Amino acid sequence: MQTAVSTIPQLVDQAARHYPDALFLEEGRTRISFGEFAHQVRAVVGSLMALDIRPGDRVAVWAPNISEWVIAAIGAQCAGAVLVTLNTRYKGSEAAYILQQSRARLLFCIGEFLGCDYPAQLQGESLPALEHRVVLRASSEANTQANSTQTWEHFLELGTGISAATIQQRMDSVSETHLSDILFTSGTTGHPKGVMTRHEQNLRAFTHFADIVGLQTGDRYLVINPFFHSFGYKAGILVCLLKGVTLLPHAVFNTEAILQRISDDRISVLPGPPTLFQSLLAHPQLEQFDLSSLRRATTGAAVIPVEMIRQMKSRLGFETVITAYGLTESCGLVTACRQGDSAETIATTSGRAIPDVEVRCVDPHNQEVPRGEPGEIVVRGFNVMQGYFENEQATRDSIDADNWLHTGDIGVMDAAGNLRITDRLKDMFITGGFNCYPAEIEKTIANHPDIIMNAVIGVADERMGEVAKVFAVRKDNSTLTPEQLIAWCREHMANYKVPRQVAFVDSLPMNASGKVLKTELRALS
């Protein structure tokens, strides 16, 4: 039995001791053992120290699921820095906002991804705190032209003069109460807020997760969920380090490519949103792939047909399918089903509270509602965030005087404590596993020269769960078409936020105080 670790540096060292020669990271031709990973992490710590990155400084990563993401991010945390993750779908201005708010001093950034030059997107953005940019897989000299920009390879050479003892001393100085990460999540204001969590609470939550799912040393874990999200980073990278599991990053979603990887790479663990498993089950050549290695699956708190759970077991071959619920403000985990739960429980609920966490459904007066009745989901326990970064008012609005985190989600709890998510107090909806916040989308669309006002709602979509629909009021004499507005949105916001439907209207329904009545808009859809 392993002793519990309370910091990520301790976790890296423990994994290297227990599984020194076992394979930790496998990507393309890259093969990194747990022992070698610890060595590479120390190289990152040394280089960050050479650049005078100090404990508590923010270090950001803006890259897809590649091995360097893991080495850079965990290395930053082992140096005592606070990890800030950036969504790869962000446009330059969206990424710049997070960098400005967090005052990140260093950015690890992919050179090119899906035909997009990421460093170039930040040109012209005001980033006074950002002193260093390290380009991963630099594709051209253009990626590293600026004085403060260097390649990953050059960055790793910077720390060669820092002694092993000095590096170890820095790693040992990281405590369980230090912040490990700030993950930015949007709210109804349209401004992303930085959620602060600590080393110990993340490791504790995802030790529970790993135990519930039944992960074992030697499992092969395909991580399609983006590393910038807690599902990919915490339920992926940290869990693999905790249990001696091989991590196989996957950068671009493609159903056939994933089926081929399961077959070729003998994948045993596969997490993902329900849309992932629906896509696999719907593939016309599904039966031609060898899926016999699959053992364990985890999926999120979206609505799932009971039949899909049954088919995940009968057609995809999973022994264990677990649904779970969490939010960034709870380290990404609140409840989970357990092995042995019925297909109906797994499909229709998000399971029960993880150990040492309390969950209730409450009325507007903060009183618990009877089982079987809907109420706002509130959470109390070790997994609740430390607060929003430099935003005390928003923190007080979310965590009450009795330390209950108010999630803004509405749920129903059954007699056994299983939680069913039914609605949201906020307008947020989920597109293919990504949270979409109407206020944020509306704010961007309001900048279009032909748009007077607009309102966004989520509408049902068979493949993506929900997608954005915008109701927009055009200026007089405007000839703007729905197709043109959608094309404009694609240039100004991440793809998952882009409205798939546009309805031009003469006016928006409003109440006496001028608030748009989205219930009426939903009735029109």
Image: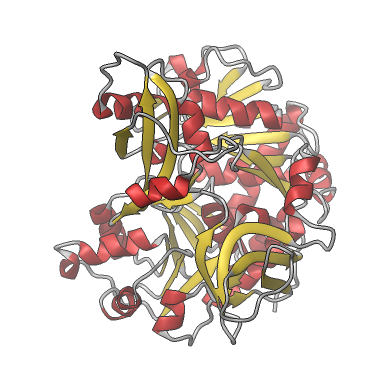
Position of 388 with respect to 247 (left or right) is right
Q: Residue at point 46% right, 81% down?
A: 345
Q: Is residue 391 visible?
A: yes
Q: Quadrant of residue 263?
A: bottom left
Q: Is residue 464 visible?
A: no
Q: Residue at point 41% right, 66% down?
A: 303
Where the N terminus falls, by quadrant? bottom right
Expressed as whole percent of the image width and height from the top left, the position of residue 400 reads 79, 57
Expressed as whole percent of the image width and height from the top left, the position of residue 260 reads 25, 58
Q: Residue at point 58% right, 19% down?
A: 149
Q: Nearer the viewer, residue 2 or 58?
A: 58
Colour mapping: secondary structure
Expressed as whole percent of the image width and height from the top left, the position of residue 59 reads 67, 35
Position of 259 with respect to 25 (left or right) is left
| Outermost residue toward the front in this view | 512
Q: Residue at point 76% right, 62% down?
A: 404
Q: Nearer the viewer, residue 395 or 38?
A: 395
Q: Nearer the viewer, residue 310 or 218?
A: 310
Q: Is residue 64 above or below residue 202?
A: above
